[in-house]
Each structure stands twice: as C-alpha cells, then as structure tokens.
Image (cartoon, grey):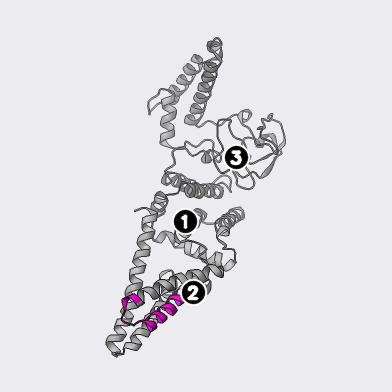
Amino acid sequence: MNEKTANIVRKVVLGIVSFVFVFGMAFLVAVYTKNRTLALLTLPTAYLLWPAIVDFVVHRHPIDGFVERNKTEYVTRLSVCFTTFLSIKMLSPTSGYAWSFGILAGYILGGFINHSIGWVESVPAEDQRYRLGFLATLLAFANATPKRTPREQTRLEESTRFILDPVGVKGREEIDQWLRDAESFFAETSMSEFISNLESAEWKQTYFHHACMLTYSTTPPAPARMELLHSLYEWSGFQDEPLFRFYDRETTLSPEQKQRWLKLLNLPSDATEQQIRIAEREITRQYATESTGKLPPDLAEAARKKVEQVNEAVRGLLGTQRDISELEFRPLHGHTPISPEPDDQFSCRCWLCAAENRIGQASQQGEARCQSCFALLGKSSSLEVPDGH
C-alpha cells in the first residue's frame, strides 16, 4: 500500500469511527433515558467532543496547544451544529433533507469563516505526514550515535526549521510538539516501508540531502550513520543520484551504476582490478589522440569523451580518489569554474547551497567541505549539479 492510499484509508477509518461514536452515544442515551430531546442534544455534544478524543487519545498530544491545533476544526463543527439546528427547526427533526441540508450548509459556512479570518488549515494531512516523516528520518540519523556533537545538533535544528518554517510552525512549543510526534512516527510503519512508498521524487531527494548534511557534519562520518545513509539511498530507489557524489567521491552509488561502468569497459560483473586496468589501457590506446588525429572534428570529440567516460568508470570501480588538479570549484562571481593550482589559496562558493567558503591551505583542496551544508567544494567536470541547487 503506497503512502497516498494509506492516508486515505486512515481518514476513512477515522470517519467511520467518528460516525459510530456520535450516533452510538445518541442511541445509548435514547435507549437508557427514553428522552428524545436529550438524545438529540447528545448528537452535537458527541460531535464536538470527538476532535478532543482524537487529539488526546489517538495522537497523544498534551493539552498545551489544543486550541491552536483544533481551532479550524471547531469553527467548522460549531457551524455544522448551528446550521443543522436551524434546518431541523424550520423543517422537521425527522426529515432527512433537513439534516443533510444543515450539515452541508455548516461545512460551507465553516469554510467561509475560516478563510475570512485566516484560519485555514495550514498543513494538509498528506503534506503534514511528509514533514513528520522528514523529521522522524532526521531524528533516526541523529540518534544513530549515543551522543550528538554541537555541530550535529545545530544541523538538526536548521533542518527542522527548513521543513517547518514554510507551514508557519515557528514557535518553540509548536516545534517541540512536531518533534514529539516525529519520535513515534515510525511506530506505525517502518522507515524502509515509508521511504519506499513515497511517491514524490522531490521529497525523497530532500530527505536524502538533509540526511547527507547531518551525516557529514562530523568528519569522519559515524559508521552507524553511513550504514543508515546507504540504506536510505536503497529505500529511495535511486539509480545514480549525483547528490551523493557531492558528499563522497569514492562511493559506488548502486549496483546498476557498477554494471553500467563494467558494460562500458566490456567486462563481466566479477571483473578483477587487473582486468579493469587492462581494459582501461586497451580502450584508451584505441581512442588515443595519435589514433584519432586524422578523424573529423565531431568524431575526434566523441573519442575524447569516450576516454573521459572510461577514466570515470575506472575511478568509480576502483574507488580511487581524484587527483586534486582534476577538481573544479564554483567561483564567487560568474559561471566559469575555478581550476586552481595545487598550492593556491582562494575563496569559492558551494555547488549545492552557494555559501561562500575559503580554502586557506593547499592540502585542503581535495577534502574541503562547505561550512554550511558540508558538501565537498571540489567536483569533477563531468559531475552535474542536481536540479534545484
């Protein structure tokens, strides 16, 4: 069952339980008291009591913040009670049309009032679940080690603000409530199932990016977080996510990527390092400049790109680190990448978040990370910046 279907099922189940509760209460009062008026008064009472039961019993929220969480719901429910009372008063308590008209008019009136005073539902149910899942995932990464460093705690707080600010959740009390809800989020479903069933590729990439930022906020990354990060990558169904390579150049991203590289080299899936080296030499020799000097420009360019692809595949398969001279950095101004000399000291921007960084020592070029999002500052020319960055 995917996330959207599960959300619909939850709403239907709560709706059925709400219906049974409201009319069940009225029925019990009618049976035991034999008083029709009291039974009718039980209907709006139970109807107004239901949101409180869901809030305190189902979601286990504290009493603090109850009004803020449920004000739009109660405006709608009070409107339904008011219009239904007028409808049955003008028509008849036994008329199904009177009840139907009153309830429908109440929902319309409640929606109008909420929009007029700005009390619209700020976070739709599905969007709220995605954001809770985001926080639950980040908490899982933060709690993967016994103790968080100050930098990890700061990164967690920044990611929390990133996901809650757009929906107007900025108060400390509200944020703490979201975090409490997130702590029990994966009690309903496993993290692997939830991530796998996410339908939005954009949400999956957002989850993964912030997990990378938290994981690499400490160098070297904690092994427990790295293991969880690779699992998150697998659950997300990524085939070749460039974002990962901005954090770890030596990571083989997926079995599919490995097979593509081996196919490029015409090698079997169990190829040894020696076979990879031999294939690299043979293909490079075949497409070497002296062999292609008499080719037309377009074919010569294709041959050059082929050699680049082969070199990329060999580096990826063998996990060898790039030479510093092959890296390029994002300039502070303009679009032409910086290709520094090994002993250069310079300023650059992060490829992902555009934050300004200073590389003050030559030895830092290869492993220099952004001080904001912790991505590697140097990248290969063939690595494309992900959309949205």
The picture places residue 154, in percent across and down from the top left corner, at 61, 55
Determine which of the numbered discs, if any, sits on residue 376 in the image: 3
Residue carrying label 1: 130
Of badges 3 and 1, the one in the foreground is 1
Question: How many residues crowd around disc 2 within 10 Å: few (fewer than 14), some, or many (20 or more)?
Answer: some
| Rendered image quadrant of residue 188 | bottom left
Residue carrying label 2: 75
The residue range painted magenta reads 77-97
Question: How many residues crowd around disc 1 within 10 Å: few (fewer than 14), some, or many (20 or more)?
Answer: many
Q: Helix, strand, or loop for circle 1?
A: helix
Residue at the image point whose x is 46% and y is 77% from the top: 78
The picture places residue 194, in percent across and down from the top left corner, at 41, 53
| CA–CA distance in space, label 2 to label 3 | 51 Å
Q: Is residue 93 left or right of residue 214?
A: left
- Determine the residue located farthest toward the front in the rendered image: 90
Q: Of the two numbered discs 3 and 1 on the same chain, state the one appearing first in sequence.
A: 1
Magenta stretch secondary structure, dominant: helix
Q: Of the two numbered discs 2 and 1 on the same chain, state the one appearing first in sequence.
A: 2
Question: How many residues crowd around disc 3 within 10 Å: few (fewer than 14), some, or many (20 or more)?
Answer: many
The picture places residue 118, in percent across and down from the top left corner, at 56, 67
Residue type beneath disc 1: Tyr
Residue at the image point whose x is 33% and y is 75% from the top: 97
Q: Helix, strand, or loop for circle 2?
A: helix
The picture places residue 72, in percent across and down from the top left corner, at 50, 70
Viewer-side residue, 155 vs 68: 68
